[in-house]
Amino acid sequence: MMWLSFTILAYFLFAFSSLADRYLLAGSLPHPRAYAFYTGITGIFAAFLIPFGFAIPELFWIFFALGTGVVSVLGLYAAYRAVFLSGVSRIVPMVGGFFPLFTFLFAWILFAERTTPSPSMLFSFLLFTLGTVLLSLRGSIREFRPSSSDLRNSLVVAFLFALGFVLAKMVYEQEGFVNGFIWIRWGGFLTAASFLLFSQTRKVVFEKNPAKERKVYLPFLIGKGTGVTAFLLQQYAISLARNFQLGIMSALQGVQYLFLLLFVGILAFKRPGLLKEEFHGANVVWRILGVLCVGAGFLFFAL
């Protein structure tokens, strides 16, 4: 179960990184494509792994791995754009529900190994997915009124995230983790660099360059550094997991929200308003139900 340990550690770091994302997307870096550029451009640093197992694959797998990186960065851009247009409260819960379902479906379709999960694992998958949705809900059900465009954007984000998940697993099975990771991240780097073809992105990156501002610079570096580490651990967990376990891994995203609540609780000693935001009104109910679902999911998973 090494993949489970690395997955939980990755979501712990993703939760820490999301604090910086929440701060930056609140106003300092409002353009989704520019923020996706800053995230994807870090793929160039995969070159540091060259001494540990780099090789040139067959031409088909070069394009396959690069294409996987393209899908991953496009998924990030779609997510930032959806949140920017509709807000976290309407997009994140739907993505949290659709992402594991798409992952499970793609893993079933694309892999020759089609081991049927046990009933307890299927039930834990459903509990993890439900817990993720509940932990990401904000406000009352009446306030959660996604439009058709919200639904469409959420489906696109979940589709791209899940596809990137499963394609990465296929690359790691063929090329090994280190070499596969390098080529995938280079595909992400090339995709991020292509965003500079858009004048609006160039304006944010080169003219305004908000990442140089003192209030942005430190959280940006911490957030991106932590996020890159979390991504590396998550990808390693993907390489370790069996094909049918990828759905469980994606459904475990609720663990990230649990860690995020923990961080918010710690920060609330200095900024009480953060705790009130997370545990106000109906949010209390969602948090409690979400924690119970995730906890029950681990219980059935252990069986």
Image: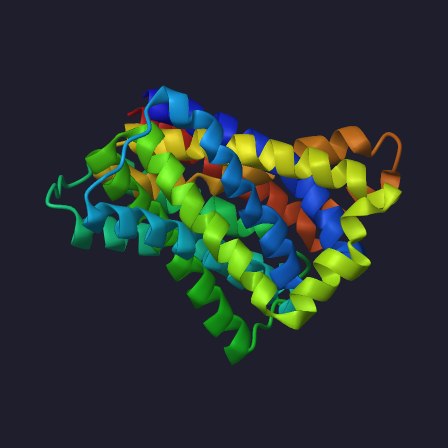
| Residue 201 vertical placement versus 184 (above, below) | below
- Relative placement, left or right, of 22 versus 2 is right
Which residue is at 23% across, 39% downward?
57
| Residue 249 vertical placement versus 83 (above, below) | above
Screen quadrant of the C terminus: top left
Asked whether 283 or 1 is in front, the reply is: 1
Asked whether 224 or 146 is in front, the reply is: 224
**Scheme by which the image is coloured:** rainbow
- Relative placement, left or right, of 202 versus 280 is left
How many numbered marks are there? 0
Screen quadrant of the N terminus: top left
Asked whether 111 or 287 is in front, the reply is: 111
Residue 89 in sight here: no
* Residue extending furthest toward the bottom: 148
Which residue is at 10% across, 45% downward?
112
Which residue is at 51% across, 79% downward?
148
Residue 52 in sight here: yes
Locate residue 195, reporting x and y percent.
Answer: 56, 62
Locate residue 86, reporting x and y percent.
Answer: 64, 69
Q: Quadrant of residue 298?
A: top left
- Relative placement, left or right, of 157 versus 29 is left
Q: Quadrant of residue 93?
A: bottom right
Locate residue 32, reporting x and y percent.
Answer: 64, 62
Q: Quadrant of residue 205?
A: bottom right
Locate residue 222, reporting x and y percent.
Answer: 70, 33
